[in-house]
Image: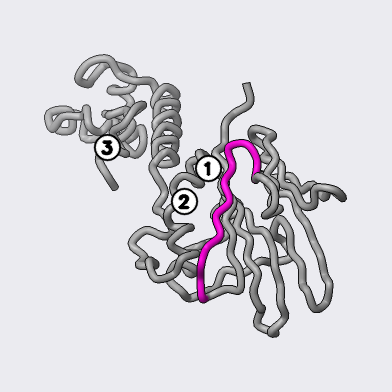
């Protein structure tokens, strides 16, 4: 483990060095103490009482509190450590969709960008399906590495933001932590960003909306791929 992760803010050298209170006491027992006392438990008691030892002794309950605080600080530092990107080290420049997702992954993960991916293609049953995928939600709920490794193929699902099977006419829509789905009779399908409340219009004949862009990808791997990017800003 990286030393900077271990010895960051909240690092406690005593709590880190000794795994339990007995080890802490043992560290203050000298060879001379053991020569005269001949009993490690008695020596520990004398150190704990302050009769023996190398200075002021931390009380047992204080040591336990310091250990707990040090562990909480360590976990907090680990949680702040940047997660490895699913696309990291993956050569995907020959696949326009995977390359586009790779270019956006870090910004989506850190909350600066939300991305909706529209895919239209045939499923494993040769049925034409289409749907809108919340890329950020997929990153949080699924291991995306197999997609960047070409072991799995990214396709819309009934659990995504929106899904439609053109053969069975099955249609579903689902909100995610990032977007609310709005089915408007006049404007068509809309997605409202839950962070800044801005609406993304996926109608190709309309503007996508404030702080949003629409990018259609030229690809041989799918019938159609469109990416909607929205730069997120907190409401003031």
Q: Which element is circle 2 on? A: helix
Is residue 164 placed above or below 184 in the rendered structure?
below
**On the image, numbered disc 2 is attached to which residue?**
104
> Which of the colour schemes (rainbow, by chain, secondary structure, one colour) is used?
one colour
* Label 1 or label 2, whichever comes before in sequence order: 2
Contact (Cβ within 8 Å) of mark 1 with mark 2:
yes
Dot 1 corresponds to which residue? 113
Is label 3 in contact with label 2 (beta carbons under 8 Å)?
A: no
Distance Cα–Cα, label 1 vs label 2? 8 Å
In the image shown, does 24 or 117 lie closer to the viewer?
Answer: 117
Residue at 39% in and 26% down: 63
Q: Does residue 26 appear to the left or right of 97 in the view shown?
A: left
Label annotation for residue 236: none
Q: How many marks?
A: 3
Identify the residue at image location x=19%, y=19%: 54
Q: Nearer the viewer, residue 115 or 89?
A: 115
Could you give the CA–CA distance between mark 1 and mark 3, rounded to whole angstroms?
29 Å
Task: Pick out the residue farthest to the front.
Answer: 205
Q: Which residue is mark 3?
A: 4
- Left-right relation of 142 to 161: left
- Residue 210 lies in the magenta stretch: yes
Which is nearer the eye, 136 or 40? 136
Q: Earlier in the sequence, mark 3 or mark 2?
A: 3
- Badge 1 crowding class, 10 Å Cα cut-off, few under 14, some 14 to 19, many 20 or more, is some
The x and y percentages for residue 73 are: 41, 32
Identify the image quadrant of residue 225: bottom right
Q: Which residues are magenta?
A: 208-220
What residue is drawn where x is 85% and y is 48%? 186
Residue 86, image quadrant? bottom left
Task: Give how far across and how far down residue 195 sits, in percent.
Answer: 64, 35
């Amino acid at each position: 483990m990286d030393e900077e992760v271990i010895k960051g803010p909240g690092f406690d050298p005593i709590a880190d060095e000794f795994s339990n209170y007995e080890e802490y006491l043992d560290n203050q027992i000298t060879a001379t103490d053991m020569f005269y006392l001949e009993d490690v438990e008695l020596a520990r008691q004398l150190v704990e009482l302050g009769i023996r030892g190398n200075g002021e002794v931390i009380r047992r309950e204080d040591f336990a509190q310091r250990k707990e605080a040090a562990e909480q600080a360590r976990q907090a530092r680990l949680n702040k450590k940047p997660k490895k990107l699913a696309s990291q080290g993956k050569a995907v420049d020959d696949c326009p969709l995977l390359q586009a997702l790779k270019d956006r992954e870090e910004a989506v993960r850190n909350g600066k960008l939300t991305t909706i991916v529209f895919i239209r293609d045939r499923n494993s049953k040769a049925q034409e399906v289409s749907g809108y995928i919340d890329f950020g939600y997929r990153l949080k709920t699924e291991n995306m590495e197999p997609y960047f490794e070409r072991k799995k193929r990214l396709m819309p699902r009934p659990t995504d933001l929106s899904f439609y099977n053109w053969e069975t006419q099955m249609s579903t829509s689902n909100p995610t932590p990032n977007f609310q789905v709005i089915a408007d009779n006049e404007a068509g399908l809309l997605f409202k960003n839950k962070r800044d409340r801005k609406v993304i219009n996926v109608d190709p004949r309309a503007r996508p909306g404030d702080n949003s862009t629409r990018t259609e990808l030229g690809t041989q791997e799918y019938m159609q791929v469109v990416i909607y990017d929205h730069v997120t800003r907190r409401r003031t």
